[in-house]
């Protein structure tokens, strides 16, 4: 199934970039994008043209299916994706996210 959630696509790009040991600036340069544009893509706050998707995938040496096709992730993969996403947040954002999770778990 195709993914239309830009935040999920951004999370996947973030994970692949970290796995490749690259910075956002390095991926942006390899893909011919500005640092700001690539950062916005990873945050899921912008829509991309297919040409941009292809350039980013080439820079990360992945196929478009890697980021555009939804797969059933194992619990461990989902957990790692959330931890990766948290690591890119500011300390204040992390604290807020953890408080929200705590409140939710307490309500169960």
Image (cartoon, rainbow, N blue to C red):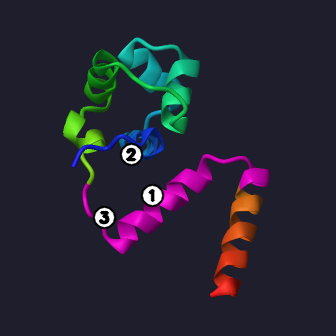
**Res 39 label:** none
Q: How far apart are the two marked residues, 1 and 3, measured between alpha carbons?
A: 10 Å
Q: How far apart are the two marked residues, 2 and 3, measured between alpha carbons?
A: 12 Å
The question of residue 77 being in magenta is answered with: yes
On the picture, is 88 further left or further right than 4?
Answer: right
Q: Residue at x 31, y 32 (%)?
A: 60
On the picture, is 39 further left or further right than 71?
Answer: right
User: 35 and 93: which one is in front?
Assistant: 93
The question of residue 103 being in magenta is answered with: no
Is mark 2 in CB contact (under 8 Å) with mark 3? no
Task: Residue under label 3, please give it.
Answer: 73
Badge 1: residue crowd in 10 Å (few <14, some 14–19, many ≥20): some
**Res 81 label:** 1
Task: Residue under label 2, please give it.
Answer: 12
| N-terminal label among 1 and 3 | 3
| N-terminal label among 2 and 1 | 2
**Residue 89 in the image: above or below residue 53:** below
Which stretch is magenta?
71-93
Is mark 2 in CB contact (under 8 Å) with mark 1? yes
């Amino acid at each position: 199934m195709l993914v239309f959630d830009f935040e999920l696509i951004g999370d996947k790009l973030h994970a692949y970039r970290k796995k490749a040991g690259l910075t956002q600036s390095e991926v942006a340069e390899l893909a011919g994008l500005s640092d700001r544009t690539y950062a916005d893509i990873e945050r899921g706050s912008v829509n991309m043209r297919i040409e941009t998707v292809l350039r980013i995938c080439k820079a990360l040496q992945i196929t478009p299916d890697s980021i555009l096709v939804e797969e059933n992730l194992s619990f461990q993969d989902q957990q790692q994706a959330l931890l990766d996403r948290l690591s890119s947040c500011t300390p204040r954002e992390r604290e807020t996210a953890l408080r929200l999770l705590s409140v939710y778990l307490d309500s169960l």
